[in-house]
Structure formats: C-alpha cells, structure tokens
C-alpha cells in the first residue's frame, strides 16, 4: 500500500510516496510525473528511511528543484485545451448500467479498453479521438465491460477489509480469533495475553507501524513453535529416511506457505503460518518435508503426502478458506 509522506529538509517540507515492497534495499526514485517515490523492504523501520533521506538531503532537494524547473519550462506556451486533452473522463450508459470511464490520449493507433478491480474502466485512445467515437467503441464492448464490472464487484464484496489494527479488532492466531488491544507506549511490541493480543506502540494511529509490530510478533512465535512441530512430526518422515532439516528459516511471503531447498536441507516457512490452526500448520510442514523425497508436485508427491497426512484435503480446504482473513492477503 502506497502512503503519502512528508519530510522537512533545510526548512522546507517535501512530499513523497512510500511503499513497502519485495525489495532488498531502500530505494529512491524521482520521476517528472510522480516526483519522489521511496520503496523499502517489508518490515522496514520507517526511521531508517527518514535517516537515509536526511543523509542524502542535498541530492533530494536538488532533484526536487530540477523537477520543478522542468515542469515550469514545459508548461510555458501550452494552451489549456492541449493540457486537457492528455486525459479526460466520460460517462456512458451500457446495458442499463451507468459507467464512468477514464480516458488517456496517447500516441497509439487503436482505442483500447481495460477494466480492473481498483481502477475501474480505463480507455486509451489515439490523440485527437472524439468522445463520440470513444462512446461508440464502449457501446460495442458493452457486454464485456458490464459483465467484468459485475464479476469484480462480487470479488470486492467477498474480499475482507484491510486490517486497521485497532482496539477491538479480531485477528487470527493459531486459528483462533483474538481480540486486539492497542496501547500507546514508548516501545513497540505485541504480546499474547490469554485470549487477547496486546500491542504496545509509539503511535496508535500508524497502521504500517502496527502491521510491522504484529509481523515481528509472528516471526518470534514461529521461531519457537515451528521447530518443535518439526521434531514432533519427524518420526513420520524418519521411516522414509528423511532427516531433520539442516536449517529452518522464516520469512514474510505473499505467494506460498513454505519453501524446501532439498539439496541444501533447508526449509523456509512463512511467518503468517502462525495465524493458521495447528493442523493446517502441520499440513504445510508435511508438505515441505515431502519435497525432500519428491521435489516436484507429481502424483507421487501427493500420494506420499497423503501417507504422511491422510486428512490432507480437509486441511487444504480449511487453509484456503482462512487465508482470506490472513493479514498479508
């Protein structure tokens, strides 16, 4: 999620966008259209970002000034009509549905239509295309547009609302919904207190900070819980000649629950596993251990996994249902 941020450099406030992504380092990027964009690895302490900006303040300031200078020069002599032609919007009635479409004029040959869940209907059209012509193309594609919008509306309704990490919110932990209590404090830490998760943070309104604190909690819990589970389940695998892994790692991942590097004897688990029930965690562990015998997802792999965990399909279904509530989703 992109956030709008500000920083004061040499007495002047500068605005920029900040986003945590799957990157290794904190990166700065200046563009004429968007100004300064900052990306950082997931879980980065935002104080590190501010420190880096301050250390490079002269470069940052000069880049902002250069962009501002270019914008002023490029804006001189342009008429309002030409500026307005760069982008526009139009409302059309398609199959009885009122649809707002954003139009962007480009150096292209054909009119293109895109429908997305977050940006709605977008039209790319050659420069100089009339609104009448665009409406004609929209009408010809009315079925595609309205059907896609209806499908995406259903997806939106089924999607869980993003966690705000506010007091009273329920968050999954080991398959149980724990009530969250957020308390302002000089330190940032999340603790488990019976049926409640208690989060102490410096800024109770800073959602990225609270998310980071929660992920730190999950990582610590995973480091204690998962190795014990591996030892507990190991007799099943020992019969097939599978040793305990040489190393177990923990990461925040967005596309899988675990990774097996069979040649190195290394297993990596998603920290969000700690939000799933015990049996679902056992399923993921069995899945990764099975890869020591079958690196792919062949029929032989699943036959062996079924031997290790006969109720595999039941817990695969439960995992799929619950992952809609998992934070990273």
Image (tube, rainbow, N blue to C red):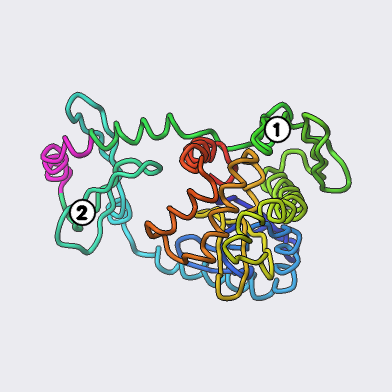
Question: Depth check: 173 or 151 in front?
Answer: 173
> Could you tell which of marks 2 and 1 lies nearer the N-terminus?
2
Residue farthest to the top?
96
Describe the element under mark 2 as helix, strand or loop: strand
296 relative position to 252: left or right: left
Q: CA distance from mark 2 to mark 1?
A: 44 Å
Tell me the residue that label 2 is attached to.
125
Residue 144 colored in magenta in the image = yes
Which residue appears at 16% of the width and 35% of the height? 143
Residue 222, percent from left and from top? 72, 52
Residue farthest to the front?
239
Q: Is residue 243 visible?
A: yes
Which residue appears at 36% of the width and 32% of the height? 153
* Quadrant of the rendered image containing residue 94: top left
97 relative position to 311: left or right: left
- Between circles 2 and 1, the one closer to the viewer is 1
Residue 28 higher or lower than 18, as above or below: below
User: Label 1 crowding class (10 Å Cα cut-off): few <14, some 14-19, many 20+?
Assistant: some
The tag on residue 166 is 1
Question: Depth check: 272 or 147 in front?
Answer: 272
Describe the element under mark 1 as helix, strand or loop: loop
Q: Is residue 18 visible?
A: no
Question: Depth check: 50 or 189 in front?
Answer: 189
Question: Depth check: 84 or 125 in front?
Answer: 125
Instruction: Report the magenta stretch's main SS.
Output: helix
Residue 155, percent from left and from top? 39, 34
Residue 229 colored in magenta in the image = no
Which residue appears at 43% of the width and 53% of the height? 303
Residue 49, percent from left and from top? 70, 63
87 relative position to 230: left or right: left
Q: Which residues are magenta?
A: 130-146
């Amino acid at each position: 999620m992109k956030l709008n941020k500000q920083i004061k450099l040499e007495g002047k406030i500068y605005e920029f966008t900040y986003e945590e992504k799957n990157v290794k380092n904190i990166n700065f990027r200046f563009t004429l259209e968007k100004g300064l964009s900052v990306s950082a690895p997931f879980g980065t302490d935002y104080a590190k970002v501010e420190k880096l900006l301050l250390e490079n303040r002269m470069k940052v300031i000069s880049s902002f000034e250069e962009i501002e200078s270019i914008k002023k020069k490029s804006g001189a002599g342009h008429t309002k009509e030409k500026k307005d032609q760069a982008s526009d919007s139009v409302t059309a009635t398609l199959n009885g549905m009122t649809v707002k479409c954003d139009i962007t004029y480009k150096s292209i040959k054909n009119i293109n239509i895109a429908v997305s869940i977050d940006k709605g209907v977008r039209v790319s059209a050659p420069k100089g295309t009339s609104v009448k012509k665009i409406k004609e193309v929209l009408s010809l594609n009315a079925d595609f547009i309205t059907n896609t919008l209806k499908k995406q509306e259903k997806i939106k309704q089924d999607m869980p609302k993003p966690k705000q990490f506010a007091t009273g919110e329920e968050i999954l932990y080991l398959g149980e919904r724990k009530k969250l209590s957020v308390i302002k404090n000089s330190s940032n830490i999340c603790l488990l207190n019976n049926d409640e998760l208690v989060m102490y943070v410096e800024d109770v309104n800073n959602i990225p900070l609270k998310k980071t604190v929660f992920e730190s909690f999950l990582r610590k819990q995973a480091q204690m819980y998962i190795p014990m589970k591996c030892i507990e389940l190991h007799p099943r695998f020992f019969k097939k000649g599978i040793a305990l892994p040489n190393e177990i790692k923990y990461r925040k991942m967005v596309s899988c629950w675990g990774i097996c590097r069979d040649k190195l004897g290394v297993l990596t688990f998603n920290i969000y596993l700690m939000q799933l029930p015990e049996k679902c965690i056992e399923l993921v562990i069995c899945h990764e251990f099975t890869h020591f015998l079958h690196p792919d997802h062949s029929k032989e792999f699943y036959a062996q996994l079924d031997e290790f965990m006969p109720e595999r399909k039941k817990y695969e279904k439960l995992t799929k249902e619950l992952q809609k509530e998992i934070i990273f989703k």
